[in-house]
Image (cartoon, rainbow, N blue to C red):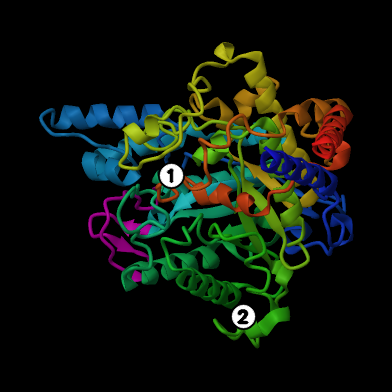
Amino acid sequence: MLLALYSLLAFLVASLGKVARGIDISGSGESLSSLELNVLQNKFASYYTNNSISVKGITIGGWLVTEPYITPSLYRNATLLAKQQNSSRNISIIDEFTLCKTLGYNTSTTLLDGHFKTWITEDDFKQIQANGFNLVRIPIGYWAWKQNAAENLYVDNITYKDPYISDGLQLKYLNQALEWAQKYELNVWIDLHGVPGSQNGFDNSGQRILYGDLGWLRSNDTRKLTLAVWKKMFETFLNGGDKSPVVGLEIVNEPLGGKIDMSNITQMYYEAFDLFKENQDSGDNTTFVIHDAFQGIGNWNLELNPNYRNVSDHYFNLTKANYSSQDILVDHHHYEVFTDYQLAETQFSRIENIINYGNSIHKELPYHPAVVGEWSGAITDCATWLNGVGVGARYDGSYYNTTLFTTDSKPAGTCASQKPLSDWTEDYRNRVRQFIEAQLATYSTKTTGWIFWNWKTEDAVEWDYLKLKDAELFPSPFDNYTYFKTDGSMKEGFSSSLSTQAFPISTTSIPFSTTTTSRKSKNFASSTKLKARTSLSIDSMSSIWKECICISIVAIITFCAIL
């Protein structure tokens, strides 16, 4: 009996200590306003005069690299076309790789050209500018640089066999997008979203690989072609001056460190930067962007940093290159829906994670600028085909009925967010709005900026800026907060109500490591926040909650003394 009481006492003391320690709302290190403007922000200065310029970006994903959950009708149409071609064949179109392979060159080209022509138009860029964004992130696949599909011929006369169609098609639309961006004074960040063999196995890399080994860097052919594509990207998009809206080049999106050896990824980053500097004129201020490869915050602080040559010289020696650590930007992606643990969290924990995440990134800024280059309004993974064509959701357990992966966790709930907004409950709508505000307020004050994913979808509302804004779930303007202040802190009424959700409903059924997934669909992108869990600041907790803990401690101490 006494042992149980003392255990409870220890828990309550620890809880109070956790509350008292709290999240460091101010973070540490220099304030954003005192940090030197990085090259990305200096480029912005040609359009904007505010010295505290930050990235306020949007991604037009699902366009030049198609994604089934963004435009499911495209994939349904592809399947219908395939059945018309051969009704007796077993059809499985799950990504752009299988779409092109199944339909063949002519049908794939017609279908994709129609998609490219209609999904994003000049009006989208006009709306993006009108909505207050200052940057557009444009994903594109390596196959855009395929020059002859019939002969599988790529740039630099490299032959690499794959089924993708191109012959300049994607680059034609990319160049059109750059013209629209220039017209509407929008900066552009070109993102190489897929590389040969797939760098992560996600369908957004072009090729979904749920269970097997990833192809990128497993053979020299994939390395050779990647370097050739980078070289062509740099030759084309660097040194454009004021005539070009391109401010950043991201060399590869979300390489899955863990399934690909990190030393190989790091080596490729350095080789890419070598190529970048070889092709960059001294007056050019385009930013070299690397994804964090799902490594912990701070992992890249000393890499690609001339102040730490003992680290960087292990990979290369740019003794003749003049560069600053501020020339390299680290791109972080963060979602809260790709593990069972995340899906079981309370709203308190979800928002706590965001604040902690932003504070951690803030400590990176003296080393490299850092942007949260992907985030969404999603608090479940219920959007149709979010986890892949034919794959269900972890939230309701259907993910484990449609894959070979297993879990010991119970489903977090019943999926509803994939339904029309009119079917959402008021509570669910409020939680989505709160989650979006937490990210906007935190990333705006603690990082170099943010890029929301995505501009639009057909029916995945939590991932669709336009639908969220129209439903008043995404602030407009961006700092028109209901629950937060412009300095990133929570408004008092909201912090008090949120504190009542401080602990999860069930902590026994959702352990930290119950799923055996291969971090499918950005599991890594959210896992790093588990390494630095603390609690909200004492000022953000309700006085009632704190008093209850104190009274409980006093009562138990008194009871123990009597015994």
Q: Residues within 10 Å of mark 2 (few under 14, many from 20)?
A: some
Percent from the top left, x then y, of residue 113?
A: 38, 38
Percent from the top left, x then y, of residue 531?
A: 63, 54
Magenta part, dominant SS: loop
Label pair 1/2, CB-CB below 8 angstroms = no
Depth check: 450 or 236 in front?
A: 450
Residue at the extreme top of the image, as rendered: 422
Instruction: Please name the residue shown 32% across and 27% down the image.
Output: 76
Instruction: Please name the residue shown 47% across and 40% down the image.
Output: 63
Nearer the viewer's eye, disc 1 or disc 2?
1
Does the magenta segment cover residue 15?
Answer: no
Looking at the image, tell me whether mark 1 or mark 2 is earlier in sequence order: 2
**Amino acid type assigned to the residue bearing label 1 in the image:** Thr
Q: Which residue is mark 2?
A: 312
Residue at the extreme left of the image, as rendered: 88
In terms of image quadrants, where is residue 434?
Answer: top right
552 relative to 287 in the view: left or right: right
Magenta residues (range): 146-169
Quadrant of the rendering where the N terminus is positioned = top right
In terms of image quadrants, where is residue 500?
Answer: top right
Depth check: 314 or 343 in front?
A: 343
